[in-house]
């Protein structure tokens, strides 16, 4: 009997790689006749940081917006924790087919935008609490406690009662990160989180993103900051004209780029 129990408790051989939180397969996106994404595959395993780099117009931000269904794609699969998005229609008429699924995915993939998107008429604390209370219907007192903790975590706990206009750009972006964290998402999506900031304010935000990476949070980051991409990423994807030109670990991509286009791109951004 004991022998049987020992055998039954032996771990089954399994793929040790964590299941991707989000997986994109053969994604195509066009605006009219303009093809922005031409068949892209990306996988963000749990606890990994994926950075998307590439010149303006390469499709990075569009890819991120397709990830959490802010944009409709025309072809390909978007899979959230093993569950594919259900679609109705094809091509330009393709739309997500299940509103509840869309809401579930969106609330689990919190997005931080370039332009903060804070409500001007609400205090910073109210901004951070708004979605968990109204969308997730969580208890107000519990959300307030979490919101204050996240504002402390990003270094602006003393700004709870201030309004967005009273904060610097770096502080507003940190408030936006606290707001994203307060949704307790499975992954964070960052769309050029530092590009609207002055260099010294940029560093405040980079510091917060690095701390989140060290905690093992799943993140997909679209960035023009090559130093941040190199420091925080497990995997870097270089997009060029809607296709993945090269991808791999940051030390390979930045240290020994294979493609001529990537070498040229890195040369043009070496000041970052």
Image (tube, rainbow, N blue to C red):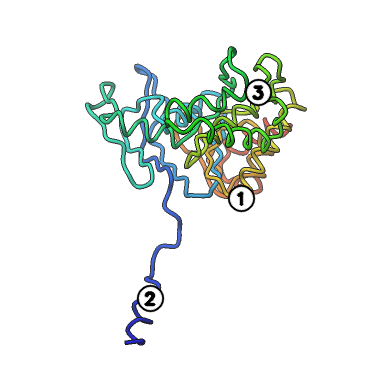
- Tell me which label, 2 or 3, sits earlier in the chain: 2
Which residue is outermost to the left?
89
Which residue is outermost to the front?
141
Whole-angstrom CA distance, mark 3 to mark 1, is: 34 Å
Q: Which residue is mark 2?
A: 9
Residues packed near mark 3 inside 10 Å, few (<14), some (14 to 19) or many (20 plus): many
Q: Is residue 123 above or below residue 140?
A: above
The label on residue 172 is: 3
Q: Which residue is mark 1?
A: 252
Is 164 left or right of 89, judged from the image as shown?
right
Residue at screen point 65% across, 21% down: 196
Q: Are marks 1 and 2 in contact (CB under 8 Å)?
A: no
Q: Quadrant of the C terminus?
A: top right
- Tell me which label, 1 or 2, sits earlier in the chain: 2
Is 197 left or right of 49, judged from the image as shown?
right
Residues packed near mark 2 inside 10 Å, few (<14), some (14 to 19) or many (20 plus): few
Number of the front mark, 1 or 2: 2
Q: Position of residue 237 (x, y in %)?
A: 53, 40
Q: Are marks 2 and 3 in contact (CB under 8 Å)?
A: no
Depth order, front residue of 132/85 = 132
Q: Position of residue 161 (x, y in %)?
A: 67, 21
Residue at screen point 57% across, 23% down: 127
Depth order, front residue of 151/205 = 151
Whole-angstrom CA distance, mark 1 to mark 2, is: 40 Å
Depth order, front residue of 198/138 = 138
Quarter location, residue 205: top right
The kind of secondary structure element at disc 2 is helix
Residue at screen point 62% across, 22% down: 124
- Tell me which label, 3 or 1, sits earlier in the chain: 3
The kind of secondary structure element at disc 3 is helix
Residues packed near mark 1 inside 10 Å, few (<14), some (14 to 19) or many (20 plus): some
Quarter location, residue 135: top left
């Amino acid at each position: 009997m004991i022998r049987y129990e020992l055998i039954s408790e032996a771990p089954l051989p399994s793929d040790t790689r964590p299941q991707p939180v989000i997986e994109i397969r053969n994604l195509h996106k066009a605006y009219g006749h303009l093809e922005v994404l031409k068949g892209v595959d990306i996988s963000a395993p749990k606890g990994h940081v994926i950075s998307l780099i590439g010149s303006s117009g390469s499709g990075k931000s569009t890819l991120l917006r397709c990830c959490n269904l802010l944009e409709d794609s025309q072809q390909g699969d978007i899979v959230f924790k093993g569950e594919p998005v259900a679609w109705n229609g094809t091509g330009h008429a393709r739309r997500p087919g299940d509103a509840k699924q869309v809401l579930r995915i969106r609330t689990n993939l919190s997005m931080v935008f370039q332009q903060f998107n804070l409500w001007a008429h609400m205090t910073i604390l109210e901004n951070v609490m708004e979605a968990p209370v109204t969308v997730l219907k969580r208890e107000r007192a519990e959300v307030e406690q979490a919101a204050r903790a996240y504002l402390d975590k990003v270094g602006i706990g003393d700004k709870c009662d201030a309004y967005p206009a009273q904060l610097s750009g770096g502080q507003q972006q940190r408030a936006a990160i606290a707001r994203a964290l307060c949704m307790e998402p499975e992954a964070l999506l960052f769309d050029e989180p530092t590009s609207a900031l002055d260099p010294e304010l940029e560093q405040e935000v980079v510091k917060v993103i690095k701390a989140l990476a060290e905690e093992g949070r799943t993140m997909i980051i679209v960035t023009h900051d090559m130093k941040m991409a190199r420091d925080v990423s497990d995997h870097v994807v270089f997009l060029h004209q809607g296709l993945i030109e090269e991808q791999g670990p940051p030390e390979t991509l930045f240290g020994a780029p294979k493609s001529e286009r990537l070498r040229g791109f890195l040369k043009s951004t070496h000041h970052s």
